[in-house]
Amino acid sequence: MRRISLKPKILDWYIVKKFVSTYLVALLIVVAIVIIFDISEKIDYFVEREAPLKAIIFDYYLNFIPYILNMFSPLFVFITVIFFTSKLAGNSEIIAMLSSGISFRRLLVPYMASAAFAATLSLLLGMYVIPPANYYRLEFEQKYVKAHRYFNTNHNIHYQIAPGQFVYVESFSSWNNSVNRFTLETVEDNKLVSKLTAATATWNDETGGWTCKNYFIRSYDEHGKETIESGALKDTVIALTVEDFYRRKNVVESLKIQDLNRLIEMQNMRGDKMVMYAQIEKHTRIATPFSAFILTLMGVALSSRKRRGGLGLNIGIGVGLSFSYILFMRFSQMFVTTGTLEPWLAIWLPNIIYAIIALFVYRMAPK
């Protein structure tokens, strides 16, 4: 078997230049189109709620751009490859390359190098740029677009806030930041040590804790003897804050990867069902960039053959397949929310299936 040379040649730089330039131009075009449609959709909210022009530009749209870039990255990686590879095939350049002794595998090298650029860009955006940008974007939307306070609709909330420490609240009221039927249990060596119950508990900003009203504390020694303490008011500081009740599903979009990992660890310990949204976000940030390699391989294999339908047919196939991939990525999240699949498997399932399709198409491509 002849050894494949990976040293860049003029042809490699030609393909990389075509790939990267077409990819970036396509992304900029779609960003401009999406922003125009978004303005037309939200202009009434901006006017009605008197959103400042500076906030619209710098807090919202400047932070909206990286989000859109990353969202449509898989789509335009595929379309980019289909577009300029079809032009090469239409001009018989692919045939000339293969006839000159360049193998199809060697031809893929500059494509995969370009895909690595797109994947790295997407990974860096998803890990470090988009989360802080999303913080300001989501704050702007909450203030000027949705313009209502968040209400926690969960009832009968059970949390393990620390090893051996469990909290139960019947309901949370956002009007005065209070919880009803508050219970705090401390367990050591599978034995109940103390149990604090209160009719209500209100968040205290000064102490950073909860002020329990009409409380009872039952304590148990090693012999099981019970001691009861009661009173009107008692301050208690625990690893549960009012922010935990205001945390929205999409707040995970504004967390850097280190903070996201800490949130997942904390929510797993607590047994919080909201952990699935953090897990979806984490695996999506990794799976989306990886798709650049799969879609590039599929795109080259599909468009390297000169077709009777020409460029239009190849682009049609590319748009259809790339949109089906994005829809599948969104649909796979339902497997997590319904508890059908583990989060990592559900999010990586589109990549697994499309990788199999890409390998099949690659075997069928002209060599």
Image (cartoon, helix red, strand yellow):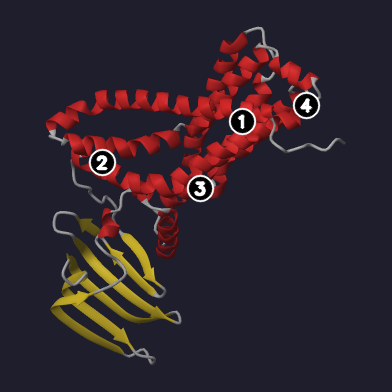
Q: Tag 1: residue type?
A: Thr
Mark 1 touches mark 2? (CB < 8 Å): no
Q: What residue did someone put label 4 on?
A: 102
| Residue 59 disc label | 2
Q: Is residue 289 above or below residue 179?
A: above
x, y (%) of residue 226? 29, 88
| Residue 283 disc label | 3
Tell me if 174 is positioned left or right of 24 in this view.
left
Rendered residue at 55%/38% (across/down): 117
Find the distance from the CA under tag 1 to the CA under tag 2: 34 Å
Q: What residue did someone put label 1 on?
A: 296
Which element type, helix, strand or loop, lies under badge 4? Answer: loop
x, y (%) of residue 257? 44, 54
Find the distance from the CA under tag 2 to the CA under tag 4: 50 Å
Find the distance from the CA under tag 4 to the CA under tag 1: 19 Å
Q: Tag 4: residue type?
A: Ile
Q: Tag 2: residue type?
A: Asp
Mark 1 touches mark 3? (CB < 8 Å): no
Q: Residues within 10 Å of mark 4 (few under 14, many from 20)?
A: some
Mark 3 or mark 4: name the one nearer the start of the chain.
4
User: How many numbered marks, from 0 up?
Assistant: 4
Q: Is residue 9 above or below residue 342?
A: above
Q: Tag 3: residue type?
A: His
Which element type, helix, strand or loop, lies under badge 1? Answer: helix
Find the distance from the CA under tag 3 to the CA under tag 2: 27 Å
Q: Name the image quarter holding residue 107.
A: top right
Find the distance from the CA under tag 1 to the CA under tag 3: 21 Å
